[in-house]
Image (cartoon, rainbow, N blue to C red):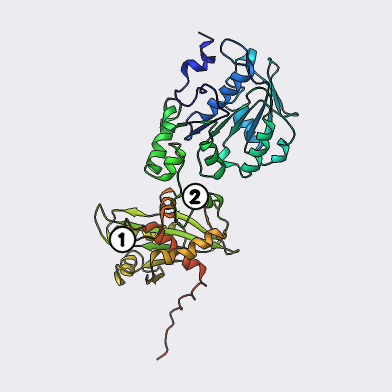
Amino acid sequence: MLALQWLFEVWALPGHQIAPPPPWRTWVILGGRGAGKTRAGAEWVRAVAEGPTPLMTGECSRLALVGETIDQVREVMIEGPSGIRAISPADRRPDYQAGRRRLVWPSGAEAFVYSAQKPDALRGPQFDGAWCDELAKWTKGREVWDQLQMGLRLGPAPRQVVTTTPRRNALLSELLEAPDSVVATAPSSANRKNLSPAFFEAVERLYDGTAFARQELEGVLLDEVPGALWRRAELEAGRGRAPELTRIVVAVDPPATVGPNADECGIVAAGIDEHDVIWVLDDWSKQGLSPAGWAALVVEAYRAHEADRIVAEINMGGKMVVELIEQVDRSIVVDTVHATRSKRTRAEPVAALYERGRVRHSGCFAALEDQMCAFVGAKGGKSPDRVDALVWAVTALTRPPPPPAPEPRVRSV
């Protein structure tokens, strides 16, 4: 019974944690957060390095462990809760020699640590196996991968395992289509019994139905929409923490209808820093609000971000839009805008600012980003209210700030 916990094949999750039968060169495991990818990779390394025993193949004696950084390899792949050392029994647990950045097994097998930020470190060494973790996040993925392939030249059939949450990039797409690759996929829910129930409650409430959930929780590699003005990789590259901002606006695109099935009211907060970089701060958009309800939410967003003014589209509501906001707070300055051009024409200059790195996101706004990456500007379909509000906010911040309202004066008689 004591040995049962080390027999991974007895209780491993089917479909993505047991290595497929050969022949294959690359086993790609695409999984959602917490799906058990790391455990699968660590168990494969253990199997090929420990043996030979009745359960372990012992087919590799010199492996490469490649992660986003050296620290990530050590803290996740080696020492983490599902890492190589944690899942190995004491009498076969490899020794980690930090100075030489290598693992050494009692069997004599070795695994060497490499950072995906330093492709040249893989120039020269040779291996008969490799484990690559979170490949879709590697900033120098192509260079690192090419160097690793040149080094996989020992033994009759060198192999490699890739464990990653999917993100669309050319290298990952190439691996998935390669004739010598075997692909396994798994959602986060596949490993539900080993994860906190509170985790699922939170992420399902926040991201259910979004593309972010399909990628990060279901482990699905999302296709880019042909002709869309924004790309997911572009948004990821521009994500960060907003610095001190010189001006903040909240833009609102009011819904044309009311009731539970009404269009969304697009509400987006954004600001600009001293270097003229625009930061999207939050997406307060919501569906099914009454006119008084969305006006109150706009004012709430304005106060939460200590904004300078509200930018409101008045195509549908005219003066009523301003009046609704003023009924909540008459002290707020409201700038009105009127759409005279098509949605795509208005959005194209904003998308160009993203391409030049002039607009960044201070956080992940899944529903907004879904709309952005699906927006092609064609007629028909659901109105992209979140995108409309984003476009108005960014456009307002690209223009010089309007002069302050004049102070009231008392006239002499």
The quarter of the rendered structure image containing the C terminus is bottom left
Can I make out residue 302 in this image?
Answer: no
Task: Determine the CA span between mark 1 and mark 2.
Answer: 27 Å
- Left or right of 128? Residue 283 is left
Q: Of 259 and 17, which appears nearest the observer?
A: 17
Residue type at the position of mark 2: Arg
| Amino acid on which the number 1 mark rests in the picture | Pro
User: Outermost residue toward the left?
Assistant: 259
Which of the two residues, 60 or 166, is positioned nearer the viewer here?
60
Q: Residue at x 42, y 84 (%)?
A: 410
Residue bearing the label numbered 1: 255
Q: Kindly indicate the quadrant of the structure image that contains residue 202.
A: top left
- Secondary structure beneath dot 2 equals helix
**x, y percentage for residue 196?**
44, 30
Instruction: Residue 91: give x, y in percent of width and height.
Output: 64, 12
Relative to 331, residue 107 above or below: above
Q: Which residue is mark 2?
A: 232
Helix, strand or loop status at disc 1: loop
